[in-house]
Amino acid sequence: METVNQKQTIIVKAEKSMGITILLTILFGPLGMLYSTVTGAIVMIIVNVIVALITFGFGLLITWPICIIWAAIATNNYNKSLSVY
């Protein structure tokens, strides 16, 4: 009989911390989003620059919380995608 040796590869990724996500985004806004979502961070950097220029910075009172919520949702989705079940 012939025996077949098969390798099983297991890839392990760590979950992203929701606390770190929120803290980084509160402190650094769209730059803090780079921890959770690169695409979202790039989009929000562009949006924040445009809004800040148009509203003399006051529009950031609206876009900054949006960054925080987006980062939290992205982290939650990432952590869910790691689950096998």
Image (cartoon, rainbow, N blue to C red):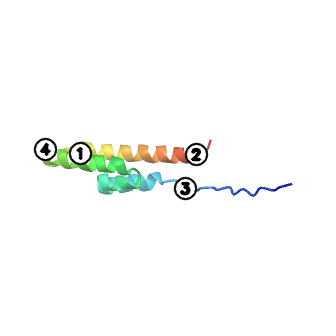
Label pair 3/2, CB-CB below 8 angstroms: no
Mark 3 and mark 4 lie on one chain; the one further toward the N terminus is 3
Spatial distance from mark 2 to mark 1, Cα to Cα? 32 Å
Residue 13, labelled with which disc? 3
Spatial distance from mark 3 to mark 4, Cα to Cα? 41 Å
Spatial distance from mark 2 to mark 4, Cα to Cα? 42 Å
Q: Amino acid at mark 3?
A: Lys
Q: Which residue is mark 2?
A: 83
Mark 1 and mark 4 lie on one chain; the one further toward the N terminus is 1
Label pair 2/1, CB-CB below 8 angstroms: no
State the SS at label 1: helix
- Point out residue 31 in the picture as x, y percentages from the top left corner: 31, 56
Q: Amino acid at mark 2?
A: Ser
Mark 1 and mark 3 lie on one chain; the one further toward the N terminus is 3
Whether 67 is drawn above or below 5: the answer is: above
Q: Label 4: how many residues lie within 10 Å, few (<14), some (14-19) or many (20+)?
A: few
Front tag of 3 and 4: 3
Q: Amino acid at mark 1?
A: Val
Q: Residue at x 48, y 54 (%)?
A: 16
Q: How many marks?
A: 4
Residue in front for this viewpoint, 61 or 67: 67
Residue 29, labelled with which disc? none
Q: Which residue is mark 4?
A: 54
Label pair 1/4, CB-CB below 8 angstroms: no
Label pair 1/3, CB-CB below 8 angstroms: no
Q: Which residue is mark 1?
A: 47
Spatial distance from mark 1 to mark 4, Cα to Cα? 11 Å
Whether 17 is drawn above or below 61: the answer is: below
